[in-house]
Amino acid sequence: MSDDEMEMWRKQWQGQPSVVVDLIRRVERETVEMRMVWFPFFAPAAVGAVATVLVALHPSLWGFLFILGLWLFGAFTLVFVKWNFKGAWTPQAETTAAYLELSILRCRRKLRDDRVGRVIAVLLPAFVLVGVLGGVYDLLKDAGALKTAGDYWIVAGTFLWTSLLIIGIVVFILFNQRRIRTKTQAELEYLLTLQQQLLREEGENMFG
């Protein structure tokens, strides 16, 4: 959240405490984004389906374990996302306090999603790397393509390059997640401050 947006929220809050239009629009925008979060799962599902077909055509214990692990990762992610969204879809009432409480809840859910996402961002690529490289090695070996020391060096170089590429992608993802996490944490702290201000104003109006 930018400083200008925070300042606008502060002015709206102080000038019209019963209705914070920007807060409501923000919640509605986030709701749309939450509904769209399922679309990125189509690509991994397609990859998993193709990998399953390939393993079915060339069955092996290594391939079976790889496919099983891949689908378990996918199932866990789907279940976690659904569980993490639970109770964070709509406000409990059409009030500023309810919209603010929902925004705070969503920030906390984003931070929880970030913690789980960091673990998956490391484990899943490592699992895929080991599975794919191991499977390719077995295929080359069974096909008799590894006959000389040069063949093994070429395979080793290819594996090393692939590993470095995947590590670079993981580092980029983790760096981007860190940026989002920092922004979300700052936003959460600001929302909590607004909530405390609302409670103080309600208390003053009640006993004043």
Image (spheres, helix red, strand yellow):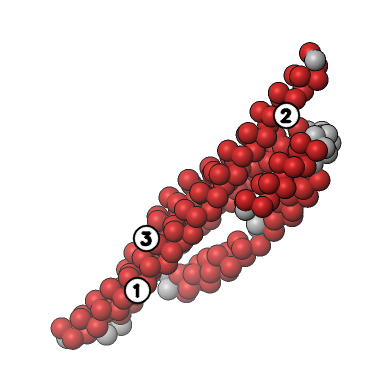
| Disc on the earlier residue, 3 or 2 | 3
State the CA–CA distance, disc 3 to disc 2. Answer: 47 Å
Q: Which residue occupies 68% across, 46% down? A: 7
Could you tell me residue 154's position as x and y percent? 24, 83
Q: Nearer the viewer, residue 188 or 82?
A: 188
State the CA–CA distance, disc 2 to disc 1. Answer: 54 Å
Give the amino acid at mark 1: Thr
In this picture, residue 125 sits left or right of residue 98? left
| Structural crowding at the residue carrying mark 3, measured as other residues with C-alpha within 10 Å and reported as few (<14), some (14–19) or many (≥20) | some
For the residues carrying marks 2 and 1, which lies nearer the camera in this image? 2
Q: Which residue is mark 3?
A: 126
Q: Secondary structure at mark 3?
A: helix
Give the amino acid at mark 2: Leu
Instruction: Report the disc number at residue 198.
Output: 2
| Structural crowding at the residue carrying mark 1, measured as other residues with C-alpha within 10 Å and reported as few (<14), some (14–19) or many (≥20) | some
Give the amino acid at mark 3: Ala
Q: Which residue is mark 1?
A: 162
Q: Nearer the viewer, residue 9 or 141?
A: 9
Q: Quadrant of the C terminus?
A: top right
Would residue 76 be seen by someone viewing this image from the given angle?
A: no
Q: Nearer the viewer, residue 47 or 113?
A: 113
Could you tell me residue 4's position as x and y percent? 66, 52
